[in-house]
Image (cartoon, rainbow, N blue to C red):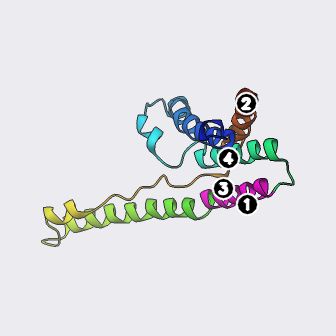
Amino acid sequence: MTIFNNVPLIASLVAIVFAQVVKVPIYLIVSRKIDLGLIFSTGGMPSSHSAAVTALMTTTAIQYGLASPYFAIATVFGVIVMFDATGVRRQAGEHAIVLNRLVLEFQELAKHAKGLTSPKQEEKTKHLKELLGHKPMEVFFGALTGIAIGFLLDYLLGTF
């Protein structure tokens, strides 16, 4: 087996790319704005993390069976990734939103107080990335995307 015949790997990578690219038209439909930066960002609908791990789980189950240790490894890995996407990473994004708001409010307060801020201090302020994790619905649709891509690519590539 060469790396180019590794259906679980190919399905996972295709699922990541597909989920990242499809975020742009979904965002366009929802917000009426184009944001090509979503292709290279974390978070959003659908979860590319979930799509990747469920494509891996699906193709591993098809090729090696549900009782295989490979499927067990892929499943545990997938559960951890999806749990983390909705848990720790999402909370980090929520914290970033609050911290960014606090920094802006402090800067406004400092502008009104005499001599408490200088232009150099404002330049040092970093805006924290807010879109880090996923809502449960984004993980769910990412998982469905990965399952569909896993079945499709196993059907298309598994016959070679």
> First in sequence: mark 4 or mark 3?
3
Q: Quadrant of residue 87?
A: bottom right
Q: Which mark is residue 82?
A: 3
Whether tag 4 and tag 3 are in contact, CB under 8 A, the answer is: no
> First in sequence: mark 3 or mark 1?
1
Please identify the dominant SS of the magenta region: helix
Give the spatial CA distance, label 1 vs label 2: 23 Å
Q: Quadrant of residue 117?
A: bottom left
- Looking at the rendered structure, the kind of residue marked 1 is Val
Q: Residue 14's spot in the image, x, y percent?
A: 59, 36
- Looking at the rendered structure, the kind of residue marked 2 is Leu
Give the spatial CA distance, label 2 vs label 3: 22 Å
Whether tag 2 and tag 4 are in contact, CB under 8 A, the answer is: no
Q: Residue 1's spot in the image, x, y percent?
A: 67, 41
Question: Callout 4: helix, strand or loop?
Answer: helix
* Horizontal relation, residue 158 to residue 97: left or right: right
Mark 2, residues whose alpha carbon is within 10 Å: few (<14), some, or many (≥20)?
A: some
> In the rendered image, which residue does mark 4 sit on?
137
Residue at 71 percent of width and 58 percent of height: 79
Please say whether residue 140 is visible from this viewpoint: no
Q: Is residue 9 above or below residue 103?
A: above
Please say whether residue 24 is visible from this viewpoint: yes
Give the spatial CA distance, label 1 vs label 4: 20 Å
Bounds of the magenta segment: 69-85
Q: Which mark is residue 152?
A: 2
> First in sequence: mark 2 or mark 4?
4
> In the rendered image, which residue does mark 1 sit on?
76
83 in magenta: yes
- Looking at the rendered structure, the kind of residue marked 3 is Met
Locate the C terminus and report the quarter of the image it occupies: top right
